[in-house]
Amino acid sequence: MRIDKDLVAASATPLVLGILAEGESYGYAILKQVNELSGGRMEWTDGMLYPLLHRLERLGHITASWSTSEQGRRRKHYAITQDGLAALAERRSQWAVVSEALEKAWSRQPMPRAAF
Amino acid sequence: MTTDVETQISEWRQYVQAHPAIVEADVDEMEEHLREQIADLTETGLGEDEAFLIAVKRMGNLDAISHEFAREHSERLWKQLVLLPDESTTGGGRRTELWVALGLGVGAAISARLGIALLDEERAAANAGLLVLPFLAAFFVWKRQVPARVAGGIALGLAVLAVVVNVFPFDEGGSTQVLTVIHAPIVAWFLVGVAYVGGDWTSHRRRMDFVRFTGEWFVYYVLLALGGGVLVGLTVGAFSTLGHDPETVIGEWVIPFGAAGAVLVAAWLVEAKQAVVENIAPVLTRIFTPLSVLMLLAVLGAFVSDGSVLHVDRDLLILMALILVLVLGLLLYAISARDPRSPVDAFDWLQLALVVSAILVDAVVLVAMLSRIAEFGASANKVAALGLNLLLLGNLLRATVLGFGFTGGREPFGAVERWQTTYLPLYAAWAAAVVVVLPPAFGWE
């Protein structure tokens, strides 16, 4: 199943913040986590993660630091900040409202069958 | 990894680096990603070549990624302006732009010259900004393809300014007239700003770009003026040794033409050659920030040792207000030139010192001013100066709080930036109020 682009974009920030809330991480590991969490059904364009991480960094939701990986290459780690946790809480409550509303609206009717 | 894949990776790296909005550190980060992806894929049994291809494919369209980076880092975007739709990377677009800028520059020069020819000297001086700046606004309206409605608004604003400056029944040479003449070009500059940001004036990023533009434009204009001044001086010298007196020609033709045309040329240079000044801006701010701190402290020391804070001279107060405006300009320029993501360094503390010393000076000036108003009553000059100082104080106080937050690691630099861009329209509003409201309020005196 391909998830709609807008939906991916809207969920990217809370998803990344949610993953980082569990502990600091780096780009590739974050993407792997997204894959695992969605059972491989949410396809992100890998490269787009980085501008997003930079944006969150600028907003002060996360901080970044460089370290050296086991293979001796530079790796950038990201960790969530207090601000980021607050933003995440805010996003979570927003999503809860949206999903509750959707659930209620859809529970009254059976899942429509696709036309083909 | 095999040398084959290493070569492919380094080729890929070069290709990514060719994108102006993606800097070296980002490429490092993405390369690390690519390598891990390749390693994971080969573990599932793929050959390295295939793994490389899939990893590159998953990375996505680099133009789209570069576009995202550019949106995120307008300071990188600033170098190349990759986002602007009218920006063509071919030479043709650049050349058209140069011709438009030159054409409008000549237009501005003719307009200024006509002003001198048709108006008396004082009127011409009062209208100088309004004779030239519409051409600059027109340049950006053309370049940014500003929507007609916005362009109309800008034109209307400029027309209102012209009417106010020339039709209001001022007492000739009175202080409200002087205030209006000083503030009208400031309002006009902000109208140019609306054109500069392509009508998107609610965007904080674009506002910051305009601040950057203003700083760079000023640097270029000063450079052009200096060069022009040397040329004019030499020419005058050469002619007078030959027994001619070129001063009327120079004064009536060369200088007005040059000064007006340079406004457009400087703007074109800023647009076309960002990468040249880009290296100068941080240097300039690093030189002048500590010097300004020293200047402010010296002024403060002089005030304190003088002991007569309450009876300072009126001219001194005006001078102080000018100094504070200059300091704020420097602050804005420094903020606009800073990479928001680099960590706190000594310069950030220095900048904070600048803000704090400016607050001290501003406080002294405010006390002196209020006491003058209490003693002599309010006048248009005093209200204008008081308003300006309060406006500056408000900005500086919050800038200090945010500055301490940033240097203490509690606030991102973005908060500092955002405060300044949020405040920006207030200056325009204040200048407009001085132009339109103060004169009638003080009976055109």
Image: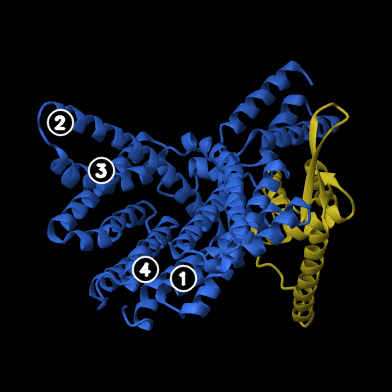
Tell me the kind of residue under disc 3: Gly
* Mark 3 or mark 4: whose residue is earlier in sequence: 4
Tell me the kind of residue under disc 1: Trp
Q: Chain of mark 4?
A: B
Under circle 2, the secondary element is helix
Task: Tell me the distance, in whole angstroms, between the alpha carbons under discs 2 and 1.
Answer: 47 Å
* Residue topped by disc 2: B240
Task: Tell me the distance, in whole angstroms, between the alpha carbons under discs 1 and 4.
Answer: 12 Å
Q: Chain coloured yellow: which letter?
A: A
Under circle 3, the secondary element is helix
* Mark 1 or mark 3: whose residue is earlier in sequence: 3
| Above or below, B159 relative to A33 | below
* Mark 1 or mark 4: whose residue is earlier in sequence: 4
Q: Chain of mark 1?
A: B
Q: Which mark is residue B179?
A: 4
Looking at the rendered image, the disc whose residue lies closer to the viewer, 1 or 4, is 4
Looking at the rendered image, the disc whose residue lies closer to the viewer, 2 or 4, is 2
Q: Which mark is residue B258?
A: 3
At 16% from the left edge and 47% from the top edge, which residue is drawn?
A: B252
Tell me the kind of residue under disc 4: Leu
Task: Tell me the distance, in whole angstroms, between the alpha carbons under discs 3 and 4.
Answer: 26 Å
- Image location of residue B35, percent across then percent down: 77, 31
Q: Chain coloured blue: which letter?
A: B
At 36% from the left edge and 63% from the top edge, which residue is drawn?
A: B182
Q: Is residue B220 left or right of residue B171?
A: right
